[in-house]
Amino acid sequence: MLWLPVEVALAPYWFTYFIFTFLMILATSWFIKLQRKVWIMEPIPGPKALPILGNALELRLDNKALFQRFMSYCDYGEVARVWIGPYPYVLLSGARAVEEVLRDSKILDKSPDYNFLHPWLGKGLLTSTGQKWHSRRKLLTPAFHFKILEDFMDIFNSQSFKMVQKLREKADGTQFDIFPYVTRCTLDVICESAMGTPINAQDETDSEYIKAIYKISELTQQRVGQAWQHPDLIYKLSGCAGKRDSQIKILHNFSLKTIRERRKKFEEKKAKVANGEVTEANGSTAENDLEYIGKKKNRLAFLDLLLEYSQDGQALTDEDIREEVDTFMFEGHDTTTSAINFSLYLLGLHPEIQVKVHEELDSIFGDSDRSVTSDDVRELKYLENCIKEALRIYPAVPIYGRENTKEIMLSNYRIPPGTAIYIINYRLHRDPEQFPNPDVYDPDRFLPENSKNRHPYAYIPFSAGPRNCIGQKFALMEEKVILSNILRQYRVKSCIPRNDLEVMGELILRPVAGNQIKLFPRTSSIE
Ligand code: HEM
């Protein structure tokens, strides 16, 4: 080296110094930004946090304990903060603070953990932001109009009749877990409603598609709950991404195949109508056929409605439709499963309330075993209040998150941009100021005279504001039909007392040991 000119010999060192200095500047500016955030957020009450690590060490817990720990952080106040590593999380459990966030049309972005759903759902309605979300929401809203939802009543009825039939062998008073029965039934409902294709989850427990749905939910939940799985690179290197992608391939192939088949049928039908091939001679007029393509004659799945809306100006590709159909599959089965199970659980603990539900059902259906109609659904007022009260105590979606792009003030606290803000429904719904004796199951809380003075954001199982749940009417109709059809036949007795019931938040709220019940035919008097 000595024979080289000195500037050449030192070049590698200069390069190293340059890189080192550059990294030092980056690290210092990152640290200054972090310190600024810490300083801004210091006044918000929350657990003591370590530098850089924050509260991460106290969050190395299983799902059940992690959920409880998050709930306990809400004891710090209706606005609380916790640090997971260098990332601040703000937890909201009071109606006033929740309203400030959910009403704000500028806080519509989802918190970063929703990114874990992108490989499966792409940027569908749940996960998209900005202009894409606006135009999709506008496009999809008519598909959830009450008149259109009435067409799904047949599916709710036929699938719940099937479940009621399957439950017959269990209705002898022995204890069993009803949770998987309800899961399979709601999977059948949403698959047929979203794609128009029965998946037969209640008959075929071996279906590749159903197994992939279970697996992907499990893998996503694991990733949300375990901080080490968050960085994409680690997720890839650990082999988890590979496992996820193989399940996603099964799910995407199934949805895309269904979409292509139905698009083909849709185009063929449209061409026939355009050519006047469909005439009165073969039993229908061209106009009637347009109604088929449109809204009236046959039941259309959400996927058909998307194909139809896609004609009116905004063309949707197969991939666009897949994102939405998969989003309905994700949002539309676990949530209703949780809600139906907790309704059954609470009714099974309160025979005096269950008797009133039975009386309401008898007054509408008598001894008939006919299907539930949409008029019946409107009449089932007491059952509706039972469902609402169950969703208050055990909200199917117990936590959901947003992220602010600009600094905001929440209950006089400054929240810097880029903060994950979580709405903790599980605690919000237990505010004793809004719900006296909050742990008591009392469906009459939802009578008009008892709810008129309640804060409008005190009870929001379906979220609220512009990004509320688009499927809430569908969900309530489905729950009412399924619960009526079960309770017209059976009495339910719950086996786990309230104080012993352990719950965990795994994307949705679920009972740790399942929903252990005893079922009796209503005609028998055995206890
Ligand atoms: C008891 C049943 C249900 C509950 C408790 C529930 C609850 C919620 C909640 C809390 C949100 C807001 C989530 C967030 O901001 O991140 C949401 C969003 C959504 N839900 Fe539901 N949901 C239920 C059933 C359904 C069903 C059956 C469907 C579809 C058929 C559905 C489709 C959606 C979609 C697409 C969104 C995203 C809306 C948007 O961002 O514009 N949900 N749901």
Image: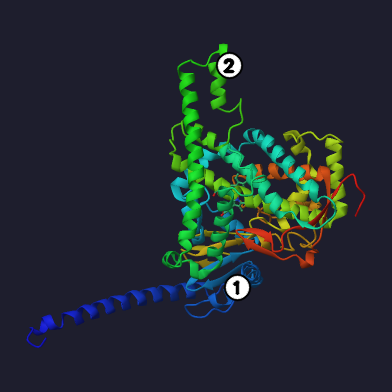
Position in image of residue 370 (x %, y %): 79, 33
Point out the residue furthest to the bottom here: 2
Quadrant where the image shows the C terminus: bottom right
Amino acid, disc 2: Ser
Instruction: In the rendered view, tell whether residue 192 sits above or below residue 265.
Output: below
2 or 1: tag closer to the N-terminus: 1
Local crowd size for mark 1, using a 10 Å CA cut-off: few (<14), some (14–19), many (≥20): some
The residue at label 1 has a CB less than 8 Å from ligand 1: no
What residue appears at the point 65 percent right and 68 percent down from the top-left corner? 64
Amino acid, disc 1: Leu
Q: Do the CB atoms of the residues marked 2 and 1 lie less than 8 Å apart?
A: no
Residue receiving disc 2: 284
State how far apart marks 2 and 1 are (Cα).
Answer: 63 Å
Position in image of residue 246 (x %, y %): 48, 55
Mark 1: secondary structure: loop
Position in image of residue 284 (x %, y %): 58, 16
Closer to the camera in the image, 521 or 405? 521
Residue receiving disc 1: 61
**Can residue 448 be seen?**
no
Mark 2: secondary structure: loop
What residue appears at the point 71 percent right and 54 percent down from the top-left corner? 179
- The way the protein has been coloured in the rendering is rainbow
**Label placed on residue 414:** none
Closer to the camera in the image, 414 or 349? 349
